[in-house]
Image (spheres, helix red, strand yellow):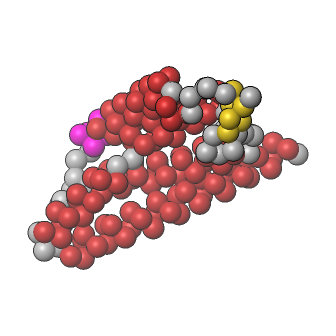
Amino acid sequence: MRDTDEAGASRPAGERPPHARWSLIALVALGGAVGTAVRALLAQALPAVDGISWTILVINVVGAFCLGLLLEAFARRGPDQGHRRSLRLFLGTGVLGGFTTYSTLADDTARLLDDGRWAAGSGYALLSVVLGLAAVVAGLAVAGASAKRAVR
């Protein structure tokens, strides 16, 4: 007998769903530690200028691009199972989840607004979201174009 998970993929009866498997949780935690460490080192090496953390903005945009690229590349390679799932969880959820930091974006924006710098705070938040969305779309497009070239 087989069960199905939330994505409709089948698994042997009695097997724990992916979100409850310690091995996958450990992969996400390890990836998160790596991504967070890289972000912290970059943020420390390149501090905020005039209260605006351009480093965090670039980190979030690069992370959004990488996530779009990664997820599109994996989606084109078949079902989210086995080593593909493990790699997606480690890199996407873990490394890129730890690398990007929208909580710092929110905190930086709030500080700018609290300091009465409404244009800077609003602009920083808007720029981060718009560039992040554009970066995801660009990542999806690059992965899609790469897949089309590989088929030829």
Q: Residue furthest top?
A: 23
Tell me: 19 left or right of 4. Answer: left
Q: Viewer-proximal residue, 115 or 98?
A: 98
The overriding secondary structure of the stretch rendered in magenta is: helix
In the picture, measured across the screen, residue 20 lies left or right of residue 109, that is: right
Residue at x 34%, y 36% (from the top left corner): 36
Q: Is residue 56 visible?
A: yes
Say which residue appears at 56% left-offset and 28% top-offset. 16
Q: Is residue 44 magenta?
A: yes
x 28%, y 73%: residue: 122
**Left or right placement of residue 108 versus residue 27 in this view:** left
User: Where residue 32 sits: x, y (%)?
Assistant: 40, 34
**Position of residue 126 measured from the top left corner of the image (x, y, whole percent):** 37, 70
Residue that lies at the very extreme toward the left in this rendered image: 115
Q: Is residue 25 magenta?
A: no
Q: How many marks?
A: 0
Is residue 91 in sight in this rendering? no
Q: Quadrant of the N terminus?
A: top right
Q: Quadrant of residue 14?
A: top right
Residue that extends furthest to the bottom in the rendered view of this protein = 119
In this view, the residue in front, 70 or 120, is: 70
Look at the image and give the residue range highlighted in magenta: 41-45
The answer to whether residue 32 is above or below residue 137 is above
Image location (x, y in percent) of residue 135: 52, 58
Q: Residue furthest right?
A: 152
Q: Residue at x 88, y 45 (%)?
A: 152
Choose between 52 and 137: the one closer to the eye.
137
* Residue 49 position (above or below residue 76): below
In the image, residue 92 lies at what x, y percent? 52, 40
Quadrant of the image occupied by residue 12: top right
Q: Name the side, left or right, on which 51 lies relative to 4.
A: left
